[in-house]
Image (spheres, rainbow, N blue to C red):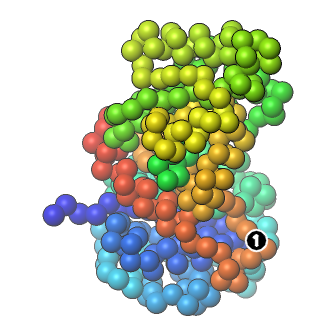
Amino acid sequence: MSRKPVIAVPVGDPAGIGPEIVAKACAKKSVSDAADIIVIGDRQIMKKAIEITHTDLTVNVVDRPADGKYLPGILNLIDLANIDQSRFSYGAVQAMCGKAAFEYIQKSIELAMAKEADAVATTPINKEALHAAQVPYIGHTEIFGALTGTKNPLTMFETNGLRVFFLTRHKSLRDMLDDITKENIKACVKESLAALRRLGVTEGTMAVAGLNPHCGEHGLFGWEEVNEITPAVEELQAEGCPVTGPIGADSVFHQAALGRYNSVLSLYHDQGHIATKTLDFDRTISITNGMPILRTSVDHGTAFDIAGKNIASEISMAEAILLAAKYAPFFKESPQTP
């Protein structure tokens, strides 16, 4: 029997809900059955999280994943010991915690790059805390891109089998329109199809979502479909790419969720976010593609308002680990670049 994938889990900002949802997820049999989990964090923080969540776990501090005891009730931890308990408090922006969160991510990337872990499943971090710690990156994607030498990491959401890629993300709607070009669409579709192949998805067709109501109705409600989107799809089809569209955004995500398409290219941030999170908010997981390592992530924040109160749900964390375990075998066998 082949071994289970080793998933590195940095606990995120210690002042947020990350440690709690990690403890709860690690205690779930479905998660421990699917993966060998190596947590990267602070021992005292994780002991507090176990106490808060009333999970039946014992912390086993190790130096590397290979030293772990992957048995029920054991939380294997690489302890970076970087939190001063006398200055720590839940639910507050703290430079110490921003620095610690970055160091947890950095260690998890080192493990994955060294092939000691098969994938990384990340927890929430706080941008203000990173800034306070003078960490020169605004978020996870930028950190992973820089530390893996990846120029343009590609984001994919998956929930209940619906996969969504994004042509544009953190831009205003007005600025987003400037990026709706034939060249950008073709490049993003090709990158997305390569990412799917690397994840073992080789059957089916990608759908490109429309931008305007009813895909513009041949120019009545906008010309982007006529001038940019349709020509991009037609040229891609002529090159043999399994893609179709544009298809109205009011129906394409529903059709993909039913299995008609293997994925959807969302043209802007909220178009895809609304579709996936409405389908299942807790199980919407982010996958960062185009890197030499596999990374999945919860798609929610640090929730400082409920941190330390045993309120946060671990569903998204558990799903992120399960999805990492699902795709890790395909990813490991694929070339280093998609």
Q: From the viewer's perspective, is residue 188 above or below residue 43?
A: above
Does 330 sit left or right of 50 as displayed?
Answer: left
Does 60 sit left or right of 296 as displayed?
Answer: left
Q: What is the number of callouts on the image? A: 1
- Identity of the residue drawn at 60% across and 26% down: 247
Taking depth in this image into account, of 110 and 242 the one nearest to the observer is 242
Quadrant containing the C terminus in the rendered view: top left
Q: From the viewer's perspective, is residue 131 above or below residue 36?
A: above
- Identity of the residue drawn at 73% across and 17% down: 217
* Disc 1 residue crowd, few under 14, some 14–19, many 20+, Cα 10 Å: some
Instruction: Report helix, strand or loop for mark 1.
Output: helix
- Identity of the residue drawn at 35% across and 44% down: 331
- Identity of the residue drawn at 66% across and 67% down: 13
Whether residue 101 appears in this view of the structure is no
Quarter residue 227 falls in? top right
Taking depth in this image into account, of 323 and 275 the one nearest to the observer is 275
Q: As shown in the figure, which amino acid type bears the numbered disc 1?
A: Phe
Quadrant containing the N terminus in the rendered view: bottom left
Looking at the image, which residue sits at the far right? Answer: 174
Does 326 sit left or right of 317 as displayed?
Answer: left
Q: Position of residue 251 (x, y in %)?
A: 62, 36
Q: Position of residue 298 (x, y in %)?
A: 58, 59
Whether residue 138 appears in this view of the structure is yes
Taking depth in this image into account, of 19 and 242 the one nearest to the observer is 242
Q: From the viewer's perspective, is residue 184 above or below residue 150?
A: above
Quarter residue 84 falls in? bottom right
Please give the residue where the numbered disc 1 appears in the rendered image: 304
